[in-house]
Image (spheres, rainbow, N blue to C red):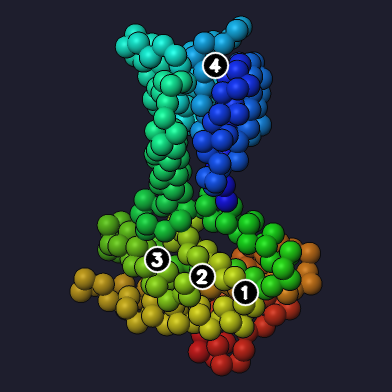
Amino acid sequence: MNSVILIVDDSPELHKLIRVHLDGEPIDIYSSFIGEQAIVDAVKLRPNLILLDLDMPGMSGFDVCRRLKADNNTSAIPIIFLTADSSQGNQIKGLDLGANSFMSKGFKPEELRARIRAALRVKSEIEKLAMVDGLTGLWNRTYMDLHLASHLSHAHRTKRPLACAVVDLDNLKHINRNHGRKIGDEVVRTVGHILASQGRAEDTAGYLINGKFMLIFPGITCSGAGAVAERARAEIEKQLAEFEGLAVNATCSLGISDTQSGTDASLLDRANQALIRAKSAGRNRICGDDSQPLPEKTRAAA
């Protein structure tokens, strides 16, 4: 997916020059020529980076920057000021307002590309960190919701199957109560590692909350996902019978659904319903979507 850059400058010639210099880069470029329109465009586009002229008629670049940084919808967008006057005073003021850096309008093409790549790289790393769960190191709920929506869209376009599993650590409250929260957190981390390591390269594991995880399986139905999930379930039971000399007996229940079902309920809702059935049936087992039952071997093993 290309990055999005918004150029804000009253000179059409500068817009053309920047587009020429960035030709071939994985970037989609949009243009605003006055400050007021730039603010509207920034909210609409949510660009990955804004190149902002300092001196414009009407609203100055400083004013635009101040407005963007005051709005939660645009405050995290990196800003590079483009200016013919890169005096120390202007740079201090711009940095105080939240801009990332300054660049003279007499820039060289390689400098422009390097600055933009660096700003986009930092933006990407910050966004990635914001979507990683601090406890497990897995993707968090925000990322998993976005990732699932993207995979669902792709599955509908290509007619390829997609499966989803919701995983719940059966006895986390018991572990926390009997062995302490520190041990409970270590058990959650270990479960997350097992879930991630037992999947295929294309599968995605995420941590939701309170011992609950989500798995996304592109290209397979409940049957294939059930086989992957059973390996993880068995490994969790094996590795976490004891932990640091303590009998924690950690187990997981899993509910799985796929896009081949004809029901109207969402993929995630159906996986949660399957999880509830797994819990009701005695825990430490896997239940599939009613319309896509798991193979007998997998259900027996569970």
CB atoms of marks 3 and 4 within 8 Å: no
Sequence-wise first label, 4 or 1: 4
Identity of the residue furthest to the top in this view:
58
The residue identified by callout 4 is 64
Side (left or right) of 274 relative to 205: right
CB atoms of marks 1 and 2 within 8 Å: yes
Q: Residue 219 bears which disc, if any?
A: 1
Callout 4 secondary element: helix
The residue identified by callout 2 is 202
Sequence-wise first label, 3 or 4: 4
Callout 3 secondary element: helix
Residue at the (59%, 26%) spot, across then down: 15
Residue at the (58%, 82%) spot, across then down: 224
Q: What amino acid is at disc 2?
A: Glu
Q: Is residue 130 above or below residue 233?
A: above
State the CA–CA distance, disc 4 to disc 2: 42 Å
Q: What amino acid is at disc 1?
A: Gly
- Disc 1 crowd, CA 10 A, few/some/many (<14, 14-19, 20+): some
Where is residue 183 shown, x and y percent of the image? Answer: 28, 62
CB atoms of marks 4 and 2 within 8 Å: no
Q: What amino acid is at disc 4?
A: Val
Q: Is residue 129 above or below residue 106?
A: below
Q: Residue 192 bears which disc, if any?
A: 3
Closest to the camera, between mark 2 and mark 3, is 2
Residue at the (34%, 14%) spot, across then down: 92
How many numbered marks have been drawn onto this rendered protein structure? 4
Sequence-wise first label, 2 or 3: 3
Q: Residue 69 bears which disc, if any?
A: none
Where is residue 46 shown, x and y percent of the image? Answer: 59, 34
Q: What amino acid is at disc 3?
A: Gly
